[in-house]
Amino acid sequence: MVDMYAKGGNLVYARRIFDSSSEKDLIVWNTLLAAYAELERSGEAMKLFYEMQLQGFHPNVISWNSLLSALLRNHQVDEAKQMFSQMSITGVEPNVVTCTTLLTGLVQNGFGFEAILLFKQMQEAGVKPNAVSLTALLSACISITSLILGKAFHGYLIRRWQQFSTEIVTSLVDMYAKCGSIAYAVKVFTMTAQKNLALYNAMISAYGLHSQAQEALTLYKKMSVENIEPDDVTFTSILSACSHEGLVDQGIEVFADIMSVYNKKPTMEHYTCLRTG
């Protein structure tokens, strides 16, 4: 019951059932803790974390991960780093989820350099990164605008992984474009055999970022050949690219496609791009 109400976002009832339960195990404590984290209720999460210990329950790695997530979602980076440091002292070793949670949180809160240092610590501790931590790492390169580090991590990926997931390839394209190298972004995109919507969107956005609207339009047209239907993100990127380069007629054509070809309703952002152009 706690799990049902917690997943539904009704913490009042979840807490009420939790408090009325005479037999609580670690799973129930962690369920409520995870719910607080999901809803960014770091204060309640911290109180529950200490309360469970007073009741004789020792937090496991799942408990710690939820607490870190709650703190980072609420932008309490210093507190999260302190709790991360305390984990090993209490005998709980951080796992890949722990490190990924902190790594992602650091990047999202603007601590790109610290995220990269954490990744180095992960390597030294023998913690193998997953796809989420790797994409977060590439986002860290974007946050500090370091093409050199981005290339270094790309080399790391090539050495360690036989195949890249589409998510990682998309992040690579995004990283190269935002760190100033459209040539490398194009190279990564071109060398990828299986392309999905997210990857096309990243490449179209990259072209727009580098004032290459014609290339973006060419790629947009190629999507229909590949039977990949554009979404709102695609149209926003294309319209923005056309607007910035004064391609009014082409922008109007794309705007018309939204309704006539794809039977979609233009968003306010699409109208804004068109008016700007």
Image (cartoon, helix red, strand yellow):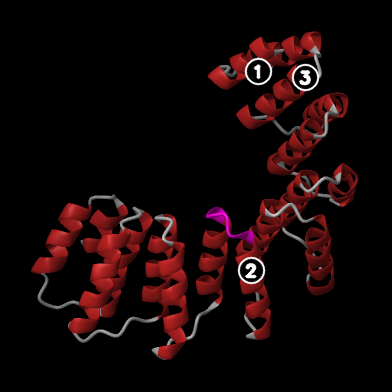
Residue 260 visible in this rendered orientation of the protein: no
Amino acid type at mark 3: Cys
Nearer mark to the viewer, of 2 and 1: 1
Question: Gap in Å between the C-alphas at discs 3 and 2?
Answer: 37 Å
Measured from the top left, where is residue 174 in percent x and y? Answer: 74, 46
Q: Secondary structure at mark 3?
A: helix
Mark 3 or mark 2, earlier in chain: 2
Specify the quadrant that holds the N terminus. Answer: bottom left
Residue at point 66% right, 54% down? Answer: 139
* Residue 99: quadrant of the picture: bottom right
Q: Quadrant of the C terminus?
A: top right
Left/right placement of residue 259 relative to residue 212 reads left
- Whether tag 2 and tag 1 are in contact, CB under 8 A, the answer is no
Nearer the observer: mark 3 or 2; the answer is: 3
Q: Secondary structure at mark 1?
A: helix
Q: CA distance from mark 3 to mark 1?
A: 9 Å
Pointer 3 local density, CA inside 10 Å: few below 14, some 14–19, many at least 20: many
Q: Is residue 40 above or below residue 205?
A: below
Q: Main secondary structure of the magenta part?
A: loop
Residue 276, given in percent of the width and then of the height, sits at 67, 13
First to last magenta residue range: 108-112
Instruction: Read off the residue under disc 3.
Output: 242
Asked if labels 1 and 3 touch by Cβ distance under 8 angstroms, the answer is: yes
Task: Where is residue 261? Give x, y as percent.
Answer: 69, 16
* Residue occupied by mark 2: 130
Viewer-proximal residue among 266 and 66: 66
Disc 1 crowd rating (10 Å Cα; few below 14, some 14-19, many 20+) is many
CA separation, marks 2 and 1?
37 Å
